[in-house]
Image: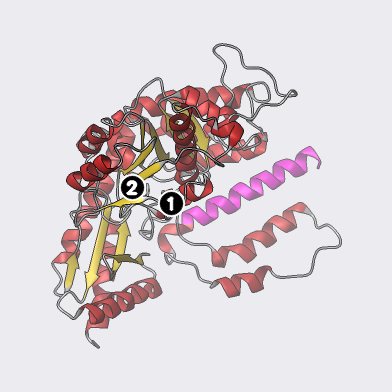
Amino acid sequence: MQITAVADLFARAAEHAADFRIALPKRIQRPQQTYAQALAAFDSATPEAGTEARAVLDDLVARATPGLHAMAGPRFFGWVIGNSHPMGVAADFLTAAWGQNVGNHTASPAGAACETVAARWLLDLLDLPREASVGFVTGATVASFVGLAAARSEVLRRIGWDVEADGLFGAPPITVLIGAEAHITVFSALQFLGLGRARVTKIAVDRQGAMLPEAFAAAMRDAESDPAVIVITQAGQLNTGAFDPQDAIIDAARRHKNVWVHVDGAFGLWARACPTRAALAAGVDRADSWATDGHKWLQTPYDCGFAIVRDAEAHRRAMTIAASYLPPVAAGERDPSHFVPELSRRARGFATWSMLRHLGRDGIAAMVERHCRYAAMLASLLSDEKGVAILNDVVLNQVIVRFGADMTPEAGDAATAQTVTAIQRDGTCFAGTAQWQGRTVMRLSVSGGSTCENDVLRSAEAIIKAWRGVHAFA
Protein backbone atom coordinates (compact mmCIF):
# COMPACT_ATOMS: atom_id res chain seq x y z
CA MET A 1 0.00 0.00 0.00
CA GLN A 2 1.09 3.57 -0.66
CA ILE A 3 2.12 5.70 2.33
CA THR A 4 -0.92 7.94 1.94
CA ALA A 5 -3.22 4.92 1.75
CA VAL A 6 -1.74 3.43 4.93
CA ALA A 7 -2.16 6.73 6.77
CA ASP A 8 -5.72 7.08 5.52
CA LEU A 9 -6.62 3.51 6.51
CA PHE A 10 -5.20 3.82 10.02
CA ALA A 11 -6.90 7.18 10.50
CA ARG A 12 -10.19 5.68 9.34
CA ALA A 13 -9.82 2.80 11.81
CA ALA A 14 -9.16 5.27 14.63
CA GLU A 15 -12.21 7.27 13.57
CA HIS A 16 -14.44 4.18 13.71
CA ALA A 17 -12.98 3.19 17.09
CA ALA A 18 -13.59 6.63 18.55
CA ASP A 19 -17.15 6.75 17.21
CA PHE A 20 -17.90 3.41 18.86
CA ARG A 21 -16.44 4.41 22.21
CA ILE A 22 -18.06 7.84 22.29
CA ALA A 23 -21.48 6.32 21.66
CA LEU A 24 -21.17 3.61 24.33
CA PRO A 25 -22.57 5.48 27.36
CA LYS A 26 -25.80 6.34 25.53
CA ARG A 27 -26.44 3.09 23.67
CA ILE A 28 -28.21 0.07 25.10
CA GLN A 29 -25.77 -2.04 27.08
CA ARG A 30 -26.24 -5.22 25.07
CA PRO A 31 -25.87 -6.39 21.45
CA GLN A 32 -28.61 -5.42 19.04
CA GLN A 33 -28.28 -8.72 17.15
CA THR A 34 -28.46 -12.36 18.06
CA TYR A 35 -25.72 -14.74 16.94
CA ALA A 36 -27.94 -15.97 14.10
CA GLN A 37 -28.51 -12.44 12.88
CA ALA A 38 -24.81 -11.60 13.12
CA LEU A 39 -23.95 -14.76 11.21
CA ALA A 40 -26.36 -13.79 8.47
CA ALA A 41 -24.78 -10.33 8.31
CA PHE A 42 -21.30 -11.78 7.74
CA ASP A 43 -22.21 -14.83 5.68
CA SER A 44 -21.23 -14.78 2.01
CA ALA A 45 -19.33 -16.82 -0.56
CA THR A 46 -15.56 -17.05 -0.37
CA PRO A 47 -14.13 -13.87 -1.98
CA GLU A 48 -12.62 -14.55 -5.41
CA ALA A 49 -11.21 -11.09 -5.96
CA GLY A 50 -9.81 -8.57 -3.51
CA THR A 51 -11.53 -5.42 -2.29
CA GLU A 52 -10.00 -2.01 -1.59
CA ALA A 53 -8.87 -1.77 2.05
CA ARG A 54 -10.92 1.23 3.16
CA ALA A 55 -14.07 -0.32 1.73
CA VAL A 56 -13.33 -3.57 3.58
CA LEU A 57 -12.83 -1.67 6.83
CA ASP A 58 -16.09 0.28 6.48
CA ASP A 59 -17.93 -2.92 5.55
CA LEU A 60 -16.52 -4.70 8.61
CA VAL A 61 -17.75 -1.92 10.88
CA ALA A 62 -21.20 -1.93 9.31
CA ARG A 63 -21.58 -5.70 9.64
CA ALA A 64 -20.06 -6.03 13.12
CA THR A 65 -21.39 -3.05 15.05
CA PRO A 66 -24.97 -4.32 15.65
CA GLY A 67 -23.59 -7.56 17.10
CA LEU A 68 -21.04 -5.95 19.42
CA HIS A 69 -21.63 -6.06 23.16
CA ALA A 70 -21.19 -2.95 25.27
CA MET A 71 -18.45 -4.60 27.30
CA ALA A 72 -16.51 -1.36 27.32
CA GLY A 73 -19.63 0.54 28.44
CA PRO A 74 -20.09 2.06 31.90
CA ARG A 75 -23.07 -0.10 32.92
CA PHE A 76 -21.85 -3.53 31.91
CA PHE A 77 -21.93 -5.79 34.99
CA GLY A 78 -22.27 -9.16 33.29
CA TRP A 79 -18.84 -10.59 34.05
CA VAL A 80 -15.69 -9.47 35.81
CA ILE A 81 -14.07 -7.81 32.83
CA GLY A 82 -12.54 -4.40 32.39
CA ASN A 83 -13.36 -1.60 29.98
CA SER A 84 -10.32 -1.87 27.69
CA HIS A 85 -9.22 1.59 28.74
CA PRO A 86 -8.50 4.02 25.87
CA MET A 87 -4.86 4.25 26.98
CA GLY A 88 -4.44 0.49 26.68
CA VAL A 89 -6.32 0.43 23.39
CA ALA A 90 -4.06 3.14 21.95
CA ALA A 91 -0.99 1.15 22.99
CA ASP A 92 -2.56 -1.96 21.51
CA PHE A 93 -3.11 -0.11 18.20
CA LEU A 94 0.62 0.54 18.13
CA THR A 95 1.39 -3.03 19.16
CA ALA A 96 -0.50 -4.32 16.15
CA ALA A 97 1.00 -1.70 13.86
CA TRP A 98 4.54 -2.38 15.07
CA GLY A 99 4.01 -6.07 14.33
CA GLN A 100 6.51 -7.31 16.89
CA ASN A 101 6.94 -11.02 17.61
CA VAL A 102 8.33 -11.14 21.15
CA GLY A 103 9.47 -14.73 21.13
CA ASN A 104 12.91 -13.56 22.20
CA HIS A 105 14.86 -10.45 23.13
CA THR A 106 16.81 -10.41 19.86
CA ALA A 107 13.70 -10.38 17.70
CA SER A 108 12.21 -7.46 19.63
CA PRO A 109 14.51 -5.78 22.14
CA ALA A 110 11.87 -3.18 22.96
CA GLY A 111 9.09 -5.75 23.39
CA ALA A 112 11.19 -7.91 25.68
CA ALA A 113 12.52 -4.95 27.67
CA CYS A 114 9.03 -3.50 28.12
CA GLU A 115 7.83 -6.81 29.58
CA THR A 116 10.81 -6.94 31.92
CA VAL A 117 10.01 -3.54 33.40
CA ALA A 118 6.23 -4.07 33.45
CA ALA A 119 6.80 -7.37 35.29
CA ARG A 120 8.87 -5.60 37.92
CA TRP A 121 6.16 -2.98 38.37
CA LEU A 122 3.48 -5.67 38.68
CA LEU A 123 5.35 -7.50 41.45
CA ASP A 124 5.79 -4.24 43.31
CA LEU A 125 2.15 -3.14 42.97
CA LEU A 126 0.80 -6.58 43.96
CA ASP A 127 3.43 -6.90 46.69
CA LEU A 128 4.55 -10.34 45.56
CA PRO A 129 8.07 -11.80 45.86
CA ARG A 130 10.33 -9.55 43.81
CA GLU A 131 12.39 -12.52 42.62
CA ALA A 132 9.33 -14.09 40.95
CA SER A 133 9.19 -14.50 37.17
CA VAL A 134 6.25 -13.25 35.10
CA GLY A 135 4.85 -14.70 31.89
CA PHE A 136 2.61 -12.46 29.78
CA VAL A 137 -0.22 -14.74 28.63
CA THR A 138 -3.72 -14.45 27.16
CA GLY A 139 -5.54 -14.38 30.49
CA ALA A 140 -5.95 -16.05 33.86
CA THR A 141 -6.91 -19.40 32.31
CA VAL A 142 -3.52 -19.75 30.65
CA ALA A 143 -1.85 -18.10 33.64
CA SER A 144 -3.13 -20.93 35.85
CA PHE A 145 -2.05 -23.43 33.21
CA VAL A 146 1.48 -22.01 33.33
CA GLY A 147 1.62 -21.82 37.12
CA LEU A 148 0.35 -25.37 37.49
CA ALA A 149 2.75 -26.59 34.80
CA ALA A 150 5.59 -25.18 36.90
CA ALA A 151 4.03 -26.84 39.96
CA ARG A 152 3.78 -30.20 38.20
CA SER A 153 7.37 -29.94 37.01
CA GLU A 154 8.82 -29.02 40.39
CA VAL A 155 6.98 -31.42 42.69
CA LEU A 156 7.86 -34.30 40.36
CA ARG A 157 11.47 -33.16 40.01
CA ARG A 158 11.85 -33.27 43.78
CA ILE A 159 11.03 -36.97 43.77
CA GLY A 160 13.20 -37.81 40.80
CA TRP A 161 10.82 -37.57 37.84
CA ASP A 162 11.47 -35.39 34.77
CA VAL A 163 7.98 -34.71 33.44
CA GLU A 164 9.24 -32.51 30.58
CA ALA A 165 11.28 -35.41 29.20
CA ASP A 166 9.26 -38.44 30.25
CA GLY A 167 5.68 -37.19 30.48
CA LEU A 168 3.18 -38.58 32.97
CA PHE A 169 3.26 -42.23 31.87
CA GLY A 170 4.41 -44.08 34.98
CA ALA A 171 4.97 -40.87 36.95
CA PRO A 172 4.33 -40.75 40.70
CA PRO A 173 0.79 -39.52 41.40
CA ILE A 174 0.12 -35.90 42.33
CA THR A 175 -2.62 -35.12 44.83
CA VAL A 176 -4.53 -31.92 44.02
CA LEU A 177 -6.52 -30.10 46.72
CA ILE A 178 -8.94 -27.39 45.60
CA GLY A 179 -11.98 -25.56 46.97
CA ALA A 180 -15.42 -26.84 46.02
CA GLU A 181 -16.29 -23.41 44.57
CA ALA A 182 -13.11 -22.92 42.53
CA HIS A 183 -13.43 -21.38 39.09
CA ILE A 184 -13.96 -23.71 36.14
CA THR A 185 -10.88 -22.38 34.34
CA VAL A 186 -8.61 -23.91 36.99
CA PHE A 187 -10.20 -27.30 36.35
CA SER A 188 -9.56 -26.71 32.64
CA ALA A 189 -5.89 -26.07 33.35
CA LEU A 190 -5.69 -29.33 35.30
CA GLN A 191 -7.34 -31.09 32.36
CA PHE A 192 -4.84 -29.66 29.88
CA LEU A 193 -1.92 -30.73 32.08
CA GLY A 194 -3.05 -34.34 32.35
CA LEU A 195 -3.86 -33.97 36.05
CA GLY A 196 -7.57 -34.41 35.44
CA ARG A 197 -10.65 -32.42 36.40
CA ALA A 198 -12.34 -35.21 38.32
CA ARG A 199 -9.52 -36.77 40.32
CA VAL A 200 -9.00 -33.74 42.56
CA THR A 201 -9.94 -33.54 46.23
CA LYS A 202 -12.57 -30.84 46.67
CA ILE A 203 -12.51 -29.03 49.99
CA ALA A 204 -15.75 -27.98 51.68
CA VAL A 205 -16.48 -24.25 51.69
CA ASP A 206 -18.44 -21.78 53.79
CA ARG A 207 -21.54 -19.93 52.61
CA GLN A 208 -19.35 -17.39 50.77
CA GLY A 209 -17.48 -20.09 48.85
CA ALA A 210 -14.23 -19.85 50.81
CA MET A 211 -12.44 -23.04 51.86
CA LEU A 212 -13.00 -24.14 55.46
CA PRO A 213 -9.61 -24.30 57.21
CA GLU A 214 -10.51 -27.35 59.28
CA ALA A 215 -11.69 -29.24 56.18
CA PHE A 216 -8.47 -28.36 54.38
CA ALA A 217 -6.32 -29.40 57.35
CA ALA A 218 -8.09 -32.77 57.44
CA ALA A 219 -7.45 -33.28 53.71
CA MET A 220 -3.78 -32.46 54.21
CA ARG A 221 -3.55 -35.04 56.98
CA ASP A 222 -5.06 -37.60 54.62
CA ALA A 223 -2.41 -36.65 52.02
CA GLU A 224 0.49 -36.84 54.48
CA SER A 225 2.04 -39.93 52.87
CA ASP A 226 1.31 -38.91 49.25
CA PRO A 227 4.47 -38.27 47.23
CA ALA A 228 3.45 -34.84 45.86
CA VAL A 229 0.68 -32.33 46.57
CA ILE A 230 -0.55 -29.27 44.67
CA VAL A 231 -2.88 -26.92 46.54
CA ILE A 232 -5.00 -24.40 44.63
CA THR A 233 -6.49 -21.48 46.53
CA GLN A 234 -8.73 -18.65 45.40
CA ALA A 235 -8.34 -14.91 45.81
CA GLY A 236 -11.77 -13.56 44.87
CA GLN A 237 -14.54 -16.10 44.37
CA LEU A 238 -16.31 -15.44 41.07
CA ASN A 239 -19.77 -14.95 42.55
CA THR A 240 -19.12 -13.60 46.03
CA GLY A 241 -15.65 -12.08 45.86
CA ALA A 242 -14.64 -14.16 48.91
CA PHE A 243 -11.03 -15.10 49.62
CA ASP A 244 -9.82 -18.46 50.86
CA PRO A 245 -8.07 -18.12 54.26
CA GLN A 246 -4.60 -18.06 52.76
CA ASP A 247 -2.49 -18.09 55.92
CA ALA A 248 -4.34 -21.00 57.50
CA ILE A 249 -4.25 -23.01 54.28
CA ILE A 250 -0.59 -22.34 53.58
CA ASP A 251 0.37 -23.13 57.19
CA ALA A 252 -1.32 -26.52 56.90
CA ALA A 253 0.07 -27.13 53.40
CA ARG A 254 3.67 -26.41 54.33
CA ARG A 255 3.67 -29.32 56.78
CA HIS A 256 3.86 -31.64 53.77
CA LYS A 257 7.36 -32.49 52.56
CA ASN A 258 6.57 -31.84 48.88
CA VAL A 259 3.86 -29.26 48.24
CA TRP A 260 3.21 -26.36 45.88
CA VAL A 261 0.55 -23.68 46.48
CA HIS A 262 -1.01 -21.93 43.46
CA VAL A 263 -3.38 -18.95 43.77
CA ASP A 264 -6.15 -18.24 41.27
CA GLY A 265 -6.39 -14.47 41.65
CA ALA A 266 -7.92 -13.56 38.30
CA PHE A 267 -9.36 -10.33 39.68
CA GLY A 268 -9.06 -10.59 43.47
CA LEU A 269 -5.27 -10.47 43.46
CA TRP A 270 -5.58 -6.77 42.58
CA ALA A 271 -7.00 -6.17 46.06
CA ARG A 272 -3.35 -6.18 47.12
CA ALA A 273 -2.87 -2.97 45.14
CA CYS A 274 -5.55 -1.20 47.19
CA PRO A 275 -4.66 -0.33 50.82
CA THR A 276 -8.28 -0.52 51.99
CA ARG A 277 -8.77 -4.02 50.52
CA ALA A 278 -5.30 -5.55 50.79
CA ALA A 279 -6.12 -7.34 54.06
CA LEU A 280 -8.54 -9.57 52.12
CA ALA A 281 -5.55 -11.13 50.34
CA ALA A 282 -3.27 -11.35 53.37
CA GLY A 283 -0.90 -14.31 53.13
CA VAL A 284 -1.23 -14.66 49.37
CA ASP A 285 2.43 -13.71 48.96
CA ARG A 286 3.44 -16.93 50.73
CA ALA A 287 2.25 -19.07 47.80
CA ASP A 288 4.44 -20.46 45.01
CA SER A 289 2.56 -19.21 41.95
CA TRP A 290 -0.23 -16.82 41.07
CA ALA A 291 -2.58 -16.23 38.13
CA THR A 292 -4.22 -12.90 37.42
CA ASP A 293 -5.65 -10.87 34.55
CA GLY A 294 -4.65 -7.54 33.07
CA HIS A 295 -7.88 -7.23 31.11
CA LYS A 296 -9.89 -7.14 34.31
CA TRP A 297 -8.85 -4.61 36.93
CA LEU A 298 -5.87 -3.19 35.04
CA GLN A 299 -8.28 -2.36 32.17
CA THR A 300 -5.92 -3.52 29.41
CA PRO A 301 -7.41 -4.75 26.13
CA TYR A 302 -8.10 -8.47 25.89
CA ASP A 303 -5.34 -11.03 25.45
CA CYS A 304 -3.58 -10.00 28.64
CA GLY A 305 -2.91 -12.05 31.75
CA PHE A 306 0.03 -12.75 34.04
CA ALA A 307 1.52 -16.06 35.17
CA ILE A 308 3.68 -15.31 38.20
CA VAL A 309 5.99 -17.96 39.66
CA ARG A 310 8.25 -17.59 42.70
CA ASP A 311 10.77 -20.17 41.41
CA ALA A 312 11.87 -18.72 38.07
CA GLU A 313 13.86 -21.85 37.23
CA ALA A 314 10.79 -24.09 37.67
CA HIS A 315 8.87 -21.61 35.51
CA ARG A 316 11.48 -21.72 32.74
CA ARG A 317 11.83 -25.50 32.92
CA ALA A 318 8.10 -25.97 32.37
CA MET A 319 7.81 -23.48 29.50
CA THR A 320 11.08 -23.01 27.61
CA ILE A 321 11.14 -23.96 23.94
CA ALA A 322 14.70 -24.59 22.76
CA ALA A 323 15.95 -24.76 19.17
CA SER A 324 19.28 -24.28 17.45
CA TYR A 325 18.05 -21.31 15.43
CA LEU A 326 16.98 -19.35 18.52
CA PRO A 327 19.51 -16.91 20.00
CA PRO A 328 21.10 -17.71 23.39
CA VAL A 329 20.19 -15.77 26.52
CA ALA A 330 23.05 -14.12 28.40
CA ALA A 331 23.08 -12.96 32.00
CA GLY A 332 20.73 -10.03 32.50
CA GLU A 333 18.69 -10.84 29.39
CA ARG A 334 15.13 -12.17 29.30
CA ASP A 335 13.36 -14.08 26.55
CA PRO A 336 9.57 -13.69 26.93
CA SER A 337 8.92 -17.13 25.41
CA HIS A 338 10.69 -18.82 28.35
CA PHE A 339 7.71 -18.06 30.56
CA VAL A 340 4.71 -18.76 28.31
CA PRO A 341 3.47 -21.66 26.13
CA GLU A 342 3.87 -19.79 22.82
CA LEU A 343 7.00 -19.06 20.85
CA SER A 344 5.35 -16.53 18.52
CA ARG A 345 2.95 -14.03 20.04
CA ARG A 346 2.01 -10.37 20.17
CA ALA A 347 3.89 -7.94 22.41
CA ARG A 348 1.51 -7.87 25.36
CA GLY A 349 3.88 -5.84 27.49
CA PHE A 350 3.27 -2.55 25.67
CA ALA A 351 -0.38 -2.23 26.75
CA THR A 352 0.44 -3.43 30.26
CA TRP A 353 3.31 -0.96 30.63
CA SER A 354 1.10 1.85 29.29
CA MET A 355 -1.76 1.17 31.69
CA LEU A 356 0.56 0.88 34.69
CA ARG A 357 2.27 4.10 33.66
CA HIS A 358 -1.03 5.89 33.02
CA LEU A 359 -2.85 4.88 36.21
CA GLY A 360 0.09 4.57 38.58
CA ARG A 361 -0.10 3.04 42.04
CA ASP A 362 -2.55 5.67 43.29
CA GLY A 363 -4.84 5.38 40.28
CA ILE A 364 -5.09 1.59 40.49
CA ALA A 365 -5.79 1.71 44.22
CA ALA A 366 -8.47 4.38 43.73
CA MET A 367 -10.16 2.42 40.94
CA VAL A 368 -10.33 -0.81 42.94
CA GLU A 369 -11.68 1.04 45.96
CA ARG A 370 -14.23 2.88 43.80
CA HIS A 371 -15.55 -0.33 42.25
CA CYS A 372 -15.86 -1.99 45.66
CA ARG A 373 -17.75 1.04 46.94
CA TYR A 374 -20.08 0.98 43.93
CA ALA A 375 -20.78 -2.73 44.48
CA ALA A 376 -21.76 -2.01 48.09
CA MET A 377 -23.96 0.87 46.89
CA LEU A 378 -25.73 -1.38 44.39
CA ALA A 379 -26.29 -4.00 47.06
CA SER A 380 -27.72 -1.42 49.46
CA LEU A 381 -30.07 0.12 46.89
CA LEU A 382 -31.39 -3.25 45.73
CA SER A 383 -31.77 -4.77 49.20
CA ASP A 384 -34.12 -1.96 50.19
CA GLU A 385 -36.63 -3.26 47.64
CA LYS A 386 -39.21 -5.76 48.90
CA GLY A 387 -38.62 -9.27 47.62
CA VAL A 388 -34.96 -8.66 46.74
CA ALA A 389 -32.15 -10.28 48.72
CA ILE A 390 -28.38 -9.94 48.53
CA LEU A 391 -26.85 -13.37 49.08
CA ASN A 392 -23.21 -12.50 49.66
CA ASP A 393 -21.12 -10.36 51.95
CA VAL A 394 -20.08 -7.58 49.59
CA VAL A 395 -16.38 -7.44 50.45
CA LEU A 396 -15.08 -6.72 46.97
CA ASN A 397 -16.77 -5.86 43.65
CA GLN A 398 -19.20 -8.78 43.37
CA VAL A 399 -22.92 -8.80 44.23
CA ILE A 400 -25.27 -11.77 43.89
CA VAL A 401 -28.96 -10.93 43.90
CA ARG A 402 -32.02 -13.08 44.41
CA PHE A 403 -35.44 -11.90 43.26
CA GLY A 404 -38.57 -13.37 44.83
CA ALA A 405 -36.76 -13.93 48.09
CA ASP A 406 -40.08 -14.46 49.84
CA MET A 407 -41.27 -17.03 47.27
CA THR A 408 -40.74 -20.75 47.12
CA PRO A 409 -37.26 -21.69 45.83
CA GLU A 410 -38.61 -22.74 42.44
CA ALA A 411 -40.73 -19.60 42.07
CA GLY A 412 -37.75 -17.49 43.09
CA ASP A 413 -35.64 -19.16 40.41
CA ALA A 414 -38.24 -18.30 37.79
CA ALA A 415 -38.68 -14.74 39.07
CA THR A 416 -34.92 -14.15 39.05
CA ALA A 417 -34.53 -15.47 35.50
CA GLN A 418 -37.49 -13.40 34.29
CA THR A 419 -36.14 -10.26 35.95
CA VAL A 420 -32.73 -10.68 34.36
CA THR A 421 -34.39 -11.17 30.97
CA ALA A 422 -36.33 -7.94 31.50
CA ILE A 423 -33.14 -6.11 32.52
CA GLN A 424 -31.34 -7.27 29.39
CA ARG A 425 -34.29 -6.38 27.19
CA ASP A 426 -34.38 -2.86 28.65
CA GLY A 427 -30.67 -2.37 28.01
CA THR A 428 -29.96 0.36 30.57
CA CYS A 429 -27.40 -1.98 32.08
CA PHE A 430 -26.31 -5.55 31.49
CA ALA A 431 -26.25 -8.37 34.02
CA GLY A 432 -26.55 -12.12 33.73
CA THR A 433 -27.71 -15.12 35.70
CA ALA A 434 -25.60 -17.64 37.55
CA GLN A 435 -26.15 -20.68 39.72
CA TRP A 436 -25.21 -20.23 43.35
CA GLN A 437 -25.67 -23.03 45.88
CA GLY A 438 -28.28 -24.67 43.71
CA ARG A 439 -30.37 -21.59 43.05
CA THR A 440 -30.64 -19.05 40.21
CA VAL A 441 -29.20 -15.64 40.99
CA MET A 442 -28.24 -12.45 39.21
CA ARG A 443 -24.56 -11.60 39.43
CA LEU A 444 -23.33 -8.02 39.28
CA SER A 445 -19.61 -7.49 38.66
CA VAL A 446 -18.44 -3.90 38.97
CA SER A 447 -15.14 -3.66 37.12
CA GLY A 448 -15.45 -1.08 34.34
CA GLY A 449 -12.99 1.77 34.46
CA SER A 450 -15.58 4.21 33.06
CA THR A 451 -18.33 3.36 35.56
CA CYS A 452 -19.36 6.30 37.72
CA GLU A 453 -21.83 6.79 40.56
CA ASN A 454 -24.56 7.98 38.22
CA ASP A 455 -24.25 4.70 36.30
CA VAL A 456 -24.80 2.81 39.54
CA LEU A 457 -27.90 4.85 40.36
CA ARG A 458 -29.35 4.47 36.84
CA SER A 459 -28.67 0.74 36.89
CA ALA A 460 -30.25 0.20 40.30
CA GLU A 461 -33.34 2.07 39.16
CA ALA A 462 -33.60 -0.04 35.98
CA ILE A 463 -33.11 -3.29 37.90
CA ILE A 464 -35.80 -2.41 40.44
CA LYS A 465 -38.17 -1.38 37.66
CA ALA A 466 -37.62 -4.72 35.91
CA TRP A 467 -38.25 -6.62 39.15
CA ARG A 468 -41.44 -4.71 39.89
CA GLY A 469 -42.70 -5.52 36.40
CA VAL A 470 -42.08 -9.22 36.95
CA HIS A 471 -43.41 -9.18 40.50
CA ALA A 472 -46.64 -7.55 39.41
CA PHE A 473 -47.49 -10.68 37.40
CA ALA A 474 -46.03 -13.25 39.78
- On the rendered structure, is 183 left or right of 335? left
**Is residue 218 inside the magenta stretch?**
no
* Residue at 68 percent of width and 25 percent of height: 107
Q: For the residue carrying disc 1, how many other residues have a C-alpha within 10 Å: few (<14), some (14-19), or many (20+)?
A: many
- Outermost residue, right direction? 49
Characterize the magenta stretch by its predominant secondary structure: helix
Judging depth in this view, the residue of 466 and 391 nearest the camera is 391
Q: For the residue carrying disc 2, how many other residues have a C-alpha within 10 Å: few (<14), some (14-19), or many (20+)?
A: many
Q: Label 2 is placed on what type of residue?
A: Ile
- Outermost residue, bottom direction? 473
CB within 8 Å, label 1 to label 2 = yes
The quadrant of the image that shows the N terminus is top right
Q: Label 1 is placed on what type of residue?
A: Phe
* Residue at 33 percent of width and 36 percent of height: 364
Query: Against 328, is 181 above or below?
Result: below
Please tell me the numbered disc located at residue 161: none
Q: Write down the region rendered in magenta.
A: 1-22
Please tell me the numbered disc located at residue 178: 2
Count the labels in the image.
2
* Residue carrying label 1: 187
Q: What percent of the width, then of the height, locates residue 403? A: 23, 73
- On the rendered structure, is 408 left or right of 191? left
**Is residue 20 inside the magenta stretch?**
yes
Judging depth in this view, the residue of 226 and 458 nearest the camera is 226
